Structures are given as C-alpha cells and as structure tokens.
C-alpha cells in the first residue's frame, strides 16, 4: 500500500469521528422548556396555583399562591374551593372542609343546604346559633339578622315583641286595664299601675275597693276587706257567706252570724233573728233541738233498739230499760239461747253452750263433732276420719283410706296403683300417689 493512500484513509476517519461527536453533543443537550410547562416533552401544564405560573420542569412542584396547597399547588387549602380556590367553604361545613369543585359538604349541627350555607328552620346567625322568635311566621326568619314576618299579636323587626296591650309567650294574653297606658311586660304582664289599682299586673284593686275602675267598696264580711275588683266577690270571714260575703253561713244566725242553728233545722238554716226553723224528720221543738220518740243520736239518726221499754231511750247514747229476752246497755242483744228481731226464738238443741247468732239462729259451734250445718242437725260424712268435721261439713281430721275432697265424699280413681294399707290418692286433689295400673296414665289414671 502506498503512503498516499494511508494518509487519505486516516483523514477520512478523523472527519467521520468529528461528525459523530457533534451529533452526540446535539442529542444530549437539554431541550429548552416553555414557561408554565413541565415534563420530558413539556407536555404538562404547571398548576394554576403555582406562583408566577412556573414550576419544576421535571416533576411540576412549585411554590403556591395563597389559598392553594399540595406539592404541585393543585389543591385548595382547607376551607377553600373553586377553579382558583377563590371561594370560602361555608362556616357550616363539618371540619371546615368542602368539595373543591362545588363547595358542597357535610353540615355541622343547625346548618342545612348542599353547601351548608343555610340554617335549619327556626335558626339564624353566622353560626346558626340563635332561635327565630316565637312570633315569626312558620318559625322562619332571615338567616343573617333574624328578621321575619310576624304572627298575629307580635311586633318588632324580629317579631320578638307583643303588640301594645298584649303579653305572654305567644302574646295571647291581654294586659290589665289597670296598666298605665295599657302597656305591660311581654313575659309576665307586670306593669306600672294607674290610681286605685295594685298587684304586679295591676289586675287588683287596692284593699276595700272593687269594680272595673275600683270605685266601689267591698262588703264587711270580706277577709281583710279585700274583694274581686270586677264584681265585689270575695273570700268570706268566718260565719259569712254569699258571693259578696253579705249573708250568714248556713247554720249560723245573729247580727255577727256567730250563733249556731240547731242541727235539726232543715238544710241547716234558721231565722237570722232567733234561730227558729223548720224541723227535719226525727227532730222536734221550736229550735228543732230534740229527737222524736224512738230516736237518739247527735242527728237523731239512730233508732232505739227493739228491746227498749215503750220504744224510749236516752237521746245521747240510746241506753234504756230492756223488755224480756233482751239484754245489753241499749237492749239490742238477745239473752243466751234466744235469737230473732224480738229475741223470741230458741237456738237449736244441736248448738253448744255458746249458743247461736241472734240475727239468724246459726250455731256458733256444734255440741257433737259428728254434726254440722246451720243448726248442727246434719251428720258429717262417714268417710271423715272418726266421722269428725267442722261446722261447715269439711272433715277436720282427714279422710278415710282411698277417699278425697274437703268432705271426703269422693273415692280415689279406680285405676290408681295401690300398695299396702295406705290411701291410693292425695286427700286434697285425688291425684294418684303411686302412679297408675298397667294401661292407664295421667294424674287420675285415665285409659292410655
């Protein structure tokens, strides 16, 4: 190979190498980014929340404008929403946060609406902390200041006052006529009184006066000389009566109504001057203070006993002399072994020594333990042990073997199992004690 050829070859290779190096430099040189974009090919926009509209060209992070948050400033700060986070979430949003797109949120107590920017019905105030007035129509008022349309008898911007002359929680009560200029406190009706009126509500007349204008004088019989201001009615002193306490109480008479009419006066009333009256039944005398013959007691309401001689007895306790067969202080009991209204009947021979009841002759006890009944003339059941029973016929010592019931008049069920000499059933109920014979079952051993 000639020298010339070698020289040309080395120069060619050098040129080619220089071209390749230049190309690599061009390829490796960073592509300039447009302002407000990032990414390998500048294909992504920096967030609207980035200061100056610029961000890190590699990952889009940036310094945030006010109201934005996040590494890329692509979120609204807590409590903000809108395309540029320029709007504030409602104070009613729970936790102070809301949807960044439209501001909707979960509401705190007393707030309402999609954005929780309204108060629930009946509330108002920045935090919906106040109640609308009772006087607001349908309990609804302006959310900001509580103003509303008033119900009847209410007044004021917030309908919190009553119209002149009315008071009460619902302004349903009328101020007293005695209130100065007919104006009173909304809550309790208290007011400043005009002449002759008194009381917190000025609904009473001063002592001793009554009528609409308190110009009339109360009756002498009124306690403390005080009466109802409209009609003069009052609470009466002792022994006075009537709406205006100008009459004596029933049963009283005399100028000061301090004398007592007799208890025998009809309807408890008597002539005011002397106490004479018309007598009730069982009373007699000019003042009706005596019982008629055959009666006694404070109000002559009791009748002398049948056993009193001549139907006459002491007017206070009814004691008297007794007819034959009668005894006792007031002769209202029969002597021993006698009974009946006139004590003329004799107790049954079957009664023991204690005798019998005087109204119907029923024996207290029977002489024989083997007898019972009204007059102890019925034999006890033969199935009672020792044939002994109470006066009502119930066996008092129990039943003979294999009988049951209060009077031991029922045999034990035929299909009860038996053993030895004992009874086959309970003496109270007849339930088989030892079970049943073969083929039978139940408490009383009916066929299975």
Image (cartoon, rainbow, N blue to C red):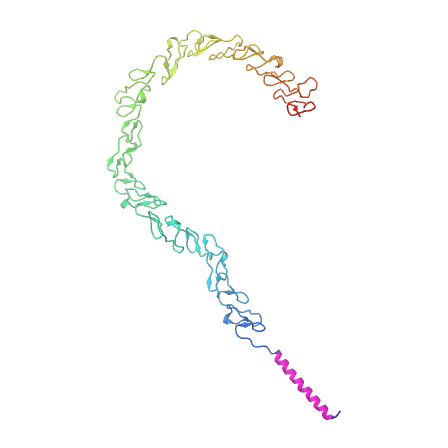
- Within the magenta stretch, is there residue 6? yes
Residue extending furthest top? 324
Task: Name the quarter where the C terminus is drawn.
Answer: top right
Q: Residue at x 63, y 81 (%)?
A: 23
**Which segment is the magenta one?**
3-27
Residue 418 is situated, as x and y percent measured from the top left of the image, at 69, 20
Q: Quadrant of residue 278?
A: top left
Residue 342 is situated, as x and y percent measured from the top left of the image, at 43, 9
Q: Which residue is drawn at 71% across and 91% down?
A: 7
Number of labels in the image equals 0
Q: In which quarter of the image is residue 410?
A: top right
Q: In which quarter of the image is residue 300?
A: top left
Q: Residue at x 27, y 27 (%)?
A: 247
Q: In this view, does 320 lie to the left or right of 427?
A: left
Residue 166 is situated, as x and y percent measured from the top left of the image, at 32, 45
Q: In this view, does 179 lie to the left or right of 385?
A: left
Residue 293 is situated, as x and y percent measured from the top left of the image, at 35, 12
Q: Nearer the viewer, residue 194 or 117?
A: 117
Residue extending furthest front? 447
Q: Residue at x 39, y 49 (%)?
A: 138
Q: Which of 343 and 328 is in front in this view?
A: 343
């Amino acid at each position: 190979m000639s020298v010339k050829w070698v020289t040309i070859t080395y120069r060619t290779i050098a040129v080619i190498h220089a071209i390749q190096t230049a190309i690599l430099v061009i390829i490796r040189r960073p592509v300039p980014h447009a302002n407000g974009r990032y990414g390998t090919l500048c294909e992504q926009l920096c967030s609207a929340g980035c200061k100056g509209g610029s961000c890190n060209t590699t990952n889009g992070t940036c310094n945030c404008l006010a109201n934005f948050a996040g590494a890329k400033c692509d979120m609204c700060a807590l409590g903000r929403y809108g395309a540029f986070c320029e709007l504030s979430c409602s104070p009613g949003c729970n936790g102070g946060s809301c949807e960044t797109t439209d501001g909707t949120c979960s509401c705190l107590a007393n707030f309402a609406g999609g954005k929780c920017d309204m108060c629930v019905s009946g509330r108002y105030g920045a935090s919906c902390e106040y109640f609308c007035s009772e006087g607001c129509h349908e309990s609804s008022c302006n959310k900001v200041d509580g103003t509303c349309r008033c119900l009847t008898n209410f007044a004021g911007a917030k309908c919190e006052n009553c119209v002149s002359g009315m008071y009460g929680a619902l302004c349903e009560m009328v101020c007293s006529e005695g209130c100065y200029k007919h104006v009173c406190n909304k809550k309790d009706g208290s007011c400043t009184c005009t002449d002759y009126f008194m009381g917190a509500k000025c609904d009473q007349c001063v002592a001793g006066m009554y009528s609409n204008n308190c110009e009339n004088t109360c009756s002498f019989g009124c306690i403390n000389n005080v009466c109802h201001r409209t009609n003069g009615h009052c609470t009466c002193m002792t022994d006075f009566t009537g709406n205006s306490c100008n009459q004596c109480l029933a049963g009283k008479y005399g100028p000061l109504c301090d004398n007592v009419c007799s208890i025998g006066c009809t309807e408890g009333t008597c002539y005011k001057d002397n106490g004479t009256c018309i007598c009730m039944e069982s009373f007699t005398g000019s003042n009706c203070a005596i019982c008629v013959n055959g009666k006694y007691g404070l109000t002559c309401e009791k009748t002398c006993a049948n056993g009193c001689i001549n139907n006459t007895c002491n007017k206070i306790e009814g004691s008297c002399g007794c007819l034959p067969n009668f005894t006792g202080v007031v002769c209202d009991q029969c002597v021993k072994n006698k009974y009946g209204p006139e004590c003329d009947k004799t107790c049954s021979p079957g009664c023991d020594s204690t005798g019998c009841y005087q109204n119907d002759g029923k024996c207290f006890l029977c002489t024989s333990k083997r007898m019972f009944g009204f007059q102890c003339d019925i034999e006890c059941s033969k199935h009672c042990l020792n044939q002994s029973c109470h006066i009502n016929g119930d066996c008092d010592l129990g039943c003979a073997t294999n009988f049951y019931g209060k009077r031991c008049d029922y045999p034990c069920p035929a299909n009860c199992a038996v053993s030895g000499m004992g009874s086959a059933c309970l003496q109270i109920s007849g339930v088989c004690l030892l079970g049943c014979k073969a083929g039978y079952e139940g408490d009383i051993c009916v066929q299975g």
